[in-house]
Amino acid sequence: MFEADVFVIGGGPAGLAAAIAARRRGLSVIVGDGNTPPIDKACGEGLMPDSRRSAERIGVHIPRSLGFEYRGVRFHGEGRNVQADFPNGCGIGVRRTALHDLLIDTAMEAGVELRWGMPVSRMDRVKARWTVGADGTASRVRNEAGLGQTTSQSRRFARRKHFARAPWTDSMEIYWGNGCQIYATPVGGEEVCIALISREPGLRIDEAIERNFPELGDRLAGAPVSSAERGGVTVTRALRHVARGNVALIGDASGSVDAITGEGICLSFKQAAILADAMARGDLSIYDRAHPQLARKPHLMAKIMLMLDRSRVIRRMSLGAMSMQPWTFRTLLAVHVA
Ligand SMILES: Cc1cc2nc3c(=O)[nH]c(=O)nc-3n(C[C@H](O)[C@H](O)[C@H](O)COP(=O)(O)OP(=O)(O)OC[C@H]3O[C@@H](n4cnc5c(N)ncnc54)[C@H](O)[C@@H]3O)c2cc1C
């Protein structure tokens, strides 16, 4: 039994962001997580410029030295290659474990009480004014609180591993293939994160590169692998409600966008600021109403990008048009991150 204003179930990026933001509004906060740091996860590890700004707003400063700054996005596919810079600063590639450490340090400095190795199996053991479910995509809290009703849902499969080599690019790169994409994110002066997303649960990174992306294969040839390949799923899910009674959901527990958008963590930071405000004002309906608006644009961008995934004709036409009229890609990217 724990007592605090806020009890956060799950200490991933969303749970820690919620805890930090709530603490800054003067609420006492405990975070309980079933795992023990360092907590790693399959992730593309790219934070767009708006992610960094949203982190700053809740008091999380992501220093340049934590990863590798990149200035835009490059698409490769169908024999084309298009690049655009962000209109609003740099993104940053950061190892998942490094980001987690930074969030833990910031939470501790803010006075959050952290309990690791503590899976929460029943919400009735939590005595807090507010309970926040930040327990990820397969959230138990969501089901226990009766918030599982979705308006849409789909999923794809993911893999991720790292290669120890200097980045060859100062952009985050997305390679478009048949039924799969790989994104390459520089995460340090000598390390690149490779993340695969596909509809085939068994597809491995090496096989996908060999089948679809010889150019990427050449870049990685001979580079030592610097992390174990990790699998995961990326779910697109929108919930009817994200708050009920004294329970609110945040991060992937509260619905998620396809990983291709690179917006998951950014959304968590934005949600955390609004949730903390709602809890401080004693009214979770503020958060319940604002939540779908935050996710609207990422969902729309994901739909557009998934059209490129599903149809080779659309992919060929779109990449062709973007390479001939680079302003179209610049505009899309600006809409995505601005
Ligand atoms: C392949 C892939 C690539 C991605 N790439 C990017 C990217 O480049 N940029 C980006 O911004 N986003 C990206 N995302 C999305 C991003 O990873 C997620 O949005 C983010 O991890 C969500 O954080 P979270 O805290 O909600 O969930 P999680 O990171 O899943 O954390 C949930 C936490 O809850 C804990 N937990 C679960 N159940 C319990 C329980 N019962 N009791 C206590 N603790 C519990 C877990 O141990 C875990 O620590 C990607 C996702 C995937 C799958």
Image: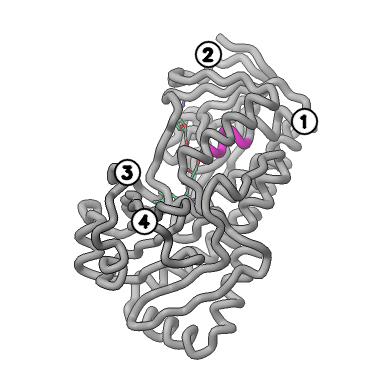
Q: Mark 3 highlights which residue? A: 227
Whole-angstrom CA distance, mark 1 to mark 4, is 43 Å
Label 3 SS: loop
Q: Position of residue 42 (x, y in %)?
A: 38, 45
Quarter-of-image position of residue 19: top right
Tag shown at residue 165: 4
Q: Mark 2 highlights which residue? A: 125
Q: Is residue 297 left or right of residue 93?
A: right
Label 2 SS: helix
Please check the rendered image and state whether residue 14 is part of the magenta-colored stretch, yes or no.
Answer: yes
User: Which residue: 67% across, 43% down?
Assistant: 61
| Quadrant location, the N terminus | top right
Name which residue type carries label 4: Arg
Q: Which comes sooner in the sequence, label 1 or label 4?
A: 1
Q: Residue furthest bottom?
A: 324
User: Which residue: 60% across, 50% down?
Assistant: 64
In depth, the one of 62 and 266 nearer the eye is 62
Q: Is mark 3 within 8 Å of ligand 1?
A: no
| Neighbourhood count class around disc 2 (C-alpha, 10 Å): few under 14, some 14–19, many 20 upward | few
Q: Is residue 112 left or right of residue 317?
A: right
Name which residue type carries label 3: Ser
Name which residue type carries label 2: Arg
User: Which residue: 33% across, 52% down?
Assistant: 163
- Magenta stretch, residue numbers: 13-17
Q: Residue furthest top?
A: 1
Label 1 SS: loop
Q: Which comes sooner in the sequence, label 2 or label 1?
A: 1
Tag shown at residue 197: none
| Neighbourhood count class around disc 1 (C-alpha, 10 Å): few under 14, some 14–19, many 20 upward | some
